[in-house]
Image (cartoon, helix red, strand yellow):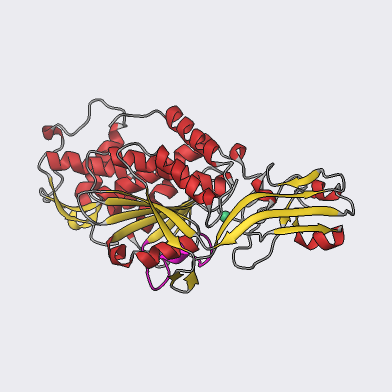
Amino acid sequence: MVAVDDGTRAARMRSHMERLYPICRSITGDGVRRTLDLVGEALPAPLVLERRAVPSGTAAYDWTVNDEWNVRDAWIADANGRRVVDFQEHNLHLVSYSVPVRARMSMDELRPHLHTLPEHPDWIPYRTTYYKRTWGFCLTQRQLDAMGEGPFEVVVDTTLEPGELTYGELVIPGDTADEILFTSHVCHPSLANDNLSGIVVAIELARTLAGLARRRFSYRFVFAPGTIGSITWLSRNGALLDRIRHGLVLTGLGGPGPLVYKRTRRGDRTIDRAATHVVRRRQGEVRDYSPYGYDERQFNAIGFDLPVGRLTRTPHGEYPEYHTSADNLGFLADEKLLDAYDALLRIVEILENDAAYLNLSPHGEPQLGKRGLYPTTGGRSASDTVMAMLWTLAYSDGRATLLDIADRAGLDFGQVCSAANDLAGAGLLERASDHPGR
Ligand code: ZN
């Protein structure tokens, strides 16, 4: 596998985000299709993003696929015809799923349809009305303050009619049909952390996983609109849900704060232990499940009970820029995106390699020196390397896994894993069983 330096990877994520940012996405429509086009183009050959289209009106458990929404234009103009709020300037200006409107209105009539953030007078809020047929504009408080009493010309040139819900799927096959699932929503318009960060980190992860010489698991990446998209995906993939051994919802990875892992509903799945190990060693935070948030709510629902956690940084609603125009490309830090990508690789490393081993020389401590296992050179400190071997020998009773041992020893999984490889190479350790559970 060709090593890619961080600068190249960061530049690639930036350029994907710059192309994705201006697109007006929603839960359906041209913006989702265009986004999936760009995700597909960003994947290296031979990876192919398969696109699925589900007609409006299709039932998905308790939900129904909505009519498709598209925007040609939208604006509010003053008496001189000057656009004082203009969708062309920022797609957050239009409430997502606004129904068509052409009207002349006073400020009194218009005001109930206007949304601002008085506490952040230069920011545009993000609002949606997916399941209630109405319309609205979002604007800065400063714009509103300058508007006067009207009259205003209001134009919402949208279509809301039967079409399709679209999502994309990518599968990278491994040695087994057991799958690790990564999902990222694709339904937010020009919002960077809460949407694009998850998409571009997922693309980089897919690129790297595809380049691995061997994969124990198969990997599935789903890029779908939030809630209705994941529920629709679940409703059409019942046959493969049993194959999902582990999963993560990815979003909010480029903003401020340390990594935050949200546990699965059960809280004791293998993904919970793997992600906790990685996130805690990066001074991140681990939280219990709650039935509010992103698509983990759907995957963890009792009827599916899938082992899917969520990786973010500071979660939704806990940073002021969330769901506002201030969640823009300048809000994201390259090093945060790279760190999230790296953490995901470490989690995958655990899922791929965790196993129980058996100490084949259990009667006292074996002599490492005569087997050449005391390192004389190398980048890692000798003591960590030796300690990893001693811990591995001490606990490899055929039941404790390498992750158990790493957690107990306070060592990185990677160190314990390479110690186990060295010990197995010297005939001191034998692989007993793969980690069984999910
Ligand atoms: Zn959101």
5 is higher (above) or lower (below) than 419: above
138 is higher (above) or lower (below) than 379: below
From the viewer's perspective, tell me whether residue 184 is left or right of residue 433.
right
Q: Residue at x 49, y 71 (%)?
A: 63
Judging depth in this view, the residue of 389 and 212 nearest the camera is: 212
Q: Residue at x 15, y 33 (%)?
A: 369
Percent position of residue 345, x then y: 36, 43
Residue 187 part of the magenta segment: no
Region rendered in magenta: 290-307
Magenta span: predominant SS is: loop
Q: Is residue 62 in sight in this rendering? A: yes
Percent position of residue 157, x then y: 67, 53
Q: Residue at x 45, y 68 (%)?
A: 58
Q: Check the picture and name the quadrant holding the N terminus.
A: top left
Percent position of residue 431, x then y: 15, 50
Q: Check the picture and name the quadrant holding the C terminus.
A: bottom left
Residue 295 part of the magenta segment: yes
From the viewer's perspective, tell me whether residue 233 is left or right of residue 98.
left
Q: Residue at x 68, y 65 (%)?
A: 134
From the viewer's perspective, tell me whether residue 332 is left or right of residue 52.
right
Q: Quadrant of residue 210?
A: top left
Q: Is residue 295 in sight in this rendering? A: no
Task: Find the residue positioned furthest to the right.
Answer: 149
